[in-house]
Image (cartoon, helix red, strand yellow):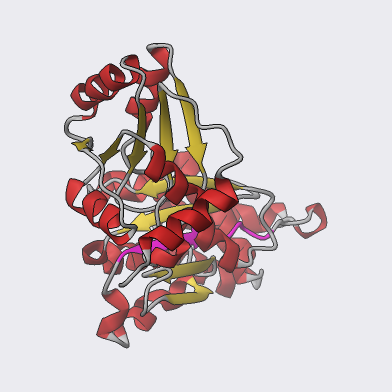
Amino acid sequence: MNIDASLLTQAAAAAAGQQQYPAATLYLVATPIGNLADISLRAIHALGLVDALACEDTRLGGALLRHLGLHKPLLALHQHNEHEASAAVIARLAAGERVAYASDAGTPAISDPGAVLVQAVVAAGYRVLPLPGPSSAVTALSVAGDTQARGFAFTGFLPTKAGERRSALQALLVVEGQSQVLFEAPHRMTELAALLAELAPTRRVTLCRELTKQFETVHTAEAGALPDWLAADAQRLRGEFVLVLHAAAPVEAADELPPEVVRVLQALVAELPLKQAVALAVQITGAPRNQLYDAALTLKNAAS
């Protein structure tokens, strides 16, 4: 990608130069999640002003600076050395320098390193200023179209151990009124889709793959349909994933299950897997499947 660095920095300065950029300050810089064009003019201007760039991966940080025609000292600061590297950043701040921090992609300290650094810098008495920009979580929420949600919660990656993973997902599914944002790696996406299909087959899910990149995919469907959709095309399992679990549709008081139906459901849930218990309850009582499933999930979690 060819960029006229002088024209770019001039445009950035014209757009962002009126802002104050004090010395002895840490600047958290949001960077593109896939498309370099998403970097802000203010981020470019600030990166041109700072004395050093701390970054999760110095190879990626260096490549970003080269794209912008900038050259700065690089400090590696990642999840394995964040405490030690924070001390090096604070030493630079103590010398009156401006230091920027950028994670590999998106906004720092949201499932990426940065929180420890921010805490250490504030504790040492120095300022931290955010430069907002790309975030895969917010980007996914914007295309989910979850009209039932009254807010959202960010979970990120679920535990990798099967039992902990199941328990964590069950807890998310009973939260009322919120979209839930999850991250997933490609090698675990099939497993997560199967678990969602088992635990909440009627819950709507927006699956986002490779956001802002050339082969970006956004697909919204009921969770029960996700395993077949993924299996239909091997390309659908490539890349990084962001999932939005839509908020459960509210159940009005007038539509609550009759006590006799609840008793049947309780007996079935106590003895059978959730999916089978719901299927039998539908046959026995004739109650709506979605409503029975939500009630069964609540009963199951209450008993665990």
Give percent across and percent down for residue 30. Answer: 43, 48
Magenta-span inclusion, residue 138? no
Residue 252 visible to an observer of this rendering = yes
Give residue 120's position: percent from left, percent from top.
Answer: 35, 19
Q: Quadrant of residue 72?
A: top left
Q: Which sits in the foreground, 164 or 56? A: 56
Quadrant into which the N terminus falls? bottom left
Q: Residue 246: where, in percent of width, then height? A: 57, 60
- Pick the residue in front: 294 or 160: 160
Give the residue drawn at x 34%, y 58%: 68
In this view of the protein, can residue 297 be seen by the observer?
no
User: Above or below — where is 226 with respect to 25?
Assistant: below
**Residue drawn 54% across the image and 69% down it:** 202
Spot occupied by residue 21 in the image (x, y as percentages of width and height):
50, 32
Please, is residue 123 above or below residue 113 in the view?
Answer: above
Answer with left or right where residue 258 lies relative to residue 248: right
> Which quadrant holds residue 224?
bottom left
Q: Is residue 71 left or right of residue 242?
A: left
Closer-to-camera residue (300/39) = 39
Specify the segment rendered in magenta: 240-249
Question: Which residue is depicted at the point 42% across and 54% down?
Answer: 182
In the rendered structure, does residue 244 fall within the stretch colored magenta?
A: yes
Residue drawn 72% across the image and 57% down it: 251
**Which residue is the extreme one toward the right?**
254
Q: Quadrant of the C terminus?
A: top left
Residue 175 vs residue 78, the one in the foreground: 78
